[in-house]
Image (cartoon, coloured by chain):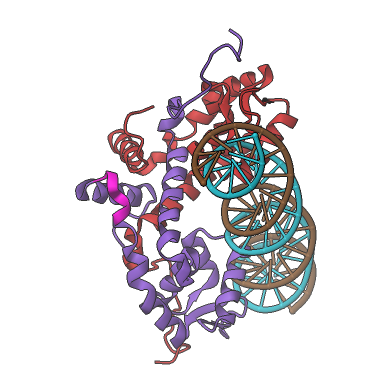
Chain colours: A purple, B red, C brown, D cyan
Amino acid sequence: MNKAMQGRIEEDKVIFGEIASSIGFLLRLAQVRVFDAFFDKLARHGLKPGEFTMLWVIGLNPGIPQGLLARKLRIKPAHMTKLVQRAVDAGRLTRTVPDDDRRTVLLTLTPDGARFVEEKKPEFLGYLPREAVALDAGEFETLIRLLQRFNGMEDAR
Amino acid sequence: MNKAMQGRIEEDKVIFGEIASSIGFLLRLAQVRVFDAFFDKLARHGLKPGEFTMLWVIGLNPGIPQGLLARKLRIKPAHMTKLVQRAVDAGRLTRTVPDDDRRTVLLTLTPDGARFVEEKKPEFLGYLPREAVALDAGEFETLIRLLQRFNGMEDAR
DNA sequence: CGAATTTTGTTTACATGGAAACTATTTCTA
DNA sequence: TAGAAATAGTTTCCATGTAAACAAAATTCG
């Protein structure tokens, strides 16, 4: 009964119980795993996932309003302001306030920004499949598709 | 050619391109989605996912060393120290330094802590399925299993 | 029209979480 | 066994990201 009595304290078989099937918990663990793999390989190249994703999407949607971009990437406006500011300072992004609505800010890549995206693209998009060690190609494909559906991304836009 | 010339600026069909199949991006979106749903329903009850998960696992593994718990939950030691401190202050957790290794800290729920976990369990474990709006029961089940595999959680421990 | 409301983005103050450096204890090794 | 190395946790400082309050411009509506 006594704590000190029970010899061994704990080894590496920790029980998770029902939480092992909690979507939130599983997503968090998966994300940390991907994150770690990402930083092991790419962070030293000055590549931050959020920053790169933002530039990538702007590259595909030149002139996108800052707020729309924030909603699509699920980034809060306050944070978006800072991300944009940094990218502008780094010379990768241009802010434009259009005449027909002087509240909004339209975002476009600078030539440097476009070059940056083009250059880092293979590393960024290629760092993931090796992560799927425990999953075969088909399972990984299924996981991707299910996550897309989960996120309401019906087609692969 | 001119930006101002092209009439419409952008509407709600934003192009993601290849990043729409990036595991990291998809996981982030999914987690934000789950997080939002969680807070809409439960945050007001003073329930924080990380804190609850920690208490939950300690409840299932009484006397678990703090470091082992941190590794299992993928929480950094520095942060774990703070989480534990808060839970101790809230009267939900007990820290014990055993005589046979006075470096380690063993964690156990207080009666209050156990009551808290028991009480919040249904809300915490039940907030998720409704989120799977876009997925049917079988797909959701598959997603859970694939995420477990992805995380190296072979059996449902 | 002109006041009230909504939309868009910024600023400030704070919370969350991690890296690096540090302390204490235990284990290894010469 | 004494010194070196490893392990466990804490502390300090910093990066990331959010909420709340705000400012400016556009829209609504009486």
Q: Is residue A133 magenta?
A: yes
Image point 44% across, 67% down: which residue? A53
Location of the N terminus of chain B by quadrant is bottom left
Residue A104 in sight: no
Q: Residue furthest bottom?
A: B1
Q: Residue furthest top?
A: A1
Query: Which residues fall within the magenta stretch?
Result: A130-135
Residue D1 versus residue A112 in the image, above or below = above
Q: Nearer the viewer, residue B138 or A114?
A: A114
Q: Nearer the viewer, residue B113 or A60?
A: B113
Residue B105 in sight: yes
Residue B92 versus residue A30 in the image, above or below = above
Which quadrant holds residue C9?
bottom right
The percent position of residue B124, horizontal first and vertical second, equals: 53, 30
Image point 53% across, 28% down: which residue? B57
Determine whether, in the image, residue B136 is placed left or right of residue B118.
left
The percent position of residue C3, horizontal first and vertical second, equals: 79, 67
Q: Is residue B61 magenta?
A: no
Magenta region, main secondary structure: helix
Image point 54% across, 24% down: which residue? B121
Label count reads 0
Which quadrant holds residue B107?
top right
Location of the C terminus of chain B by quadrant is top left
The percent position of residue B22, horizontal first and vertical second, equals: 35, 59
Which quadrant holds residue A5?
top right
Image point 59% across, 33% down: which residue? B66
The percent position of residue A76, horizontal first and vertical second, equals: 58, 60
